[in-house]
Image: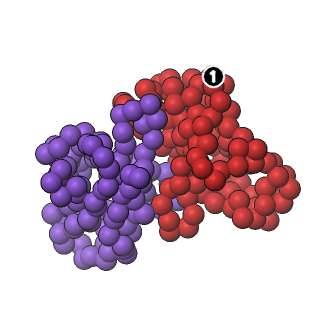
């Protein structure tokens, strides 16, 4: 079945470091791909998304490119801030009758001053 | 932007009692709402999908008689945990979409349920 695999955390970085969180997916066809962020004690917020191959989603300095050939959607940011500390979830969804999201296991990011 | 309000944010209840969690879309009509459960430091597990005016579709392994979902209007869905037990303690999150997810999903802020 469809699934999303993320790198295990926690990822600990110093402020202004470069961030990469790997995400790969398994699916037949081309789903839409998402990154969500969850701050402590809160629900999820959509960070960015891409709906077709080679699309690049971007928001708040974060970027991810939909790579069909490697079935990946890695999240990157050039310079992280302490306020970026959160849990990041990669997810996929199909534009079919269910539209439900399938989440990866989440990657906790801790940015130290 | 789209806002989903989830209430309560925290609730403590005694074993054997029932707890109702509300999920409201404040500025859009939510055709579809989803209910998730999140265990500590783990991902979100989809429990059920509810469409306004029809019965919820439960994921495999989720007890429909224990987790009652009602989606009576386009702006409100409720999850009732019946006869709660300590193992039901978890973080429950709802999300809503105006068009079966095609136009994006907005998540509520979650409900921390503790059963004592």
Furthest toward the right, the residue is B16
Q: Quadrant of the N terminus of chain B?
A: top left
Relative to A48, does residue A75 appear above or below in the rendering? below
Q: According to the image, label 1 marks what residue? A: B53
Q: Residue A8: name its quadrant.
A: bottom left
Q: Residues within 10 Å of mark 1 (few under 14, many from 20)?
A: few
Relative to A105, does residue A101 appear above or below in the rendering? above
Q: Quadrant of the C terminus of chain B?
A: bottom right
Residue closer to the observer: A35 or B60: B60
Residue lying at 22% horizontally and 57% vertically, measured from the top left: A72
Does the rendering let one see residue A29? yes
The letter of the red chain is B
Does the rendering let one see residue B4? no
Chain of the residue under the numbered disc 1 shown in the image: B
Tell me, what hue is chain A?
A: purple
Residue lying at 70% horizontally and 49% vertically, measured from the top left: B63
Q: Residue A21: name its quadrant.
A: bottom left
B25 vs A22, left or right, is: right
Residue lying at 39% horizontally and 32% vertically, measured from the top left: A96
Residue closer to the observer: A103 or B109: A103
Residue B49 x/y as whole percent: 56, 38
Relative to A3, does residue B97 appear above or below in the rendering? above
A103 vs B59, left or right, is: left
A11 vs B100, left or right, is: left
Residue closer to the observer: B110 or A94: A94
Residue B2 x/y as whole percent: 42, 32
């Amino acid at each position: 079945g469809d699934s999303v695999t993320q790198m295990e955390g926690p990822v600990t970085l110093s402020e202004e470091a470069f961030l990469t969180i790997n995400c790969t997916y398994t699916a037949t066809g081309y789903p839409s791909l998402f990154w969500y962020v969850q701050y402590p004690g809160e629900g999820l917020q959509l960070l960015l998304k891409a709906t077709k191959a080679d699309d690049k989603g971007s928001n708040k300095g974060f970027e991810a490119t939909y790579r069909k050939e490697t079935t990946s959607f890695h999240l990157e940011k050039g310079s992280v801030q302490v306020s970026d500390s959160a849990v990041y979830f990669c997810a996929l969804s199909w534009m079919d009758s269910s539209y439900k999201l399938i989440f990866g296991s989440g990657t906790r990011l801790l940015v130290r001053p | 932007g789209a806002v989903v309000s989830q209430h309560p944010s925290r609730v403590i209840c005694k074993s054997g009692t029932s707890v109702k969690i509300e999920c409201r879309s404040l500025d859009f009509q939510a055709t579809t709402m989803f209910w998730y459960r999140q265990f500590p430091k783990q991902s979100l597990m989809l429990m059920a999908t509810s469409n306004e005016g029809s019965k919820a579709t439960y994921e495999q392994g989720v007890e429909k008689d224990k987790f009652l979902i009602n989606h009576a209007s386009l702006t409100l869905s409720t999850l009732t945990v019946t006869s709660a037990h300590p193992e039901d303690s978890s973080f429950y999150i709802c999300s809503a979409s105006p068009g079966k997810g095609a136009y994006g999903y907005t998540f509520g802020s979650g409900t921390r349920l503790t059963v004592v």
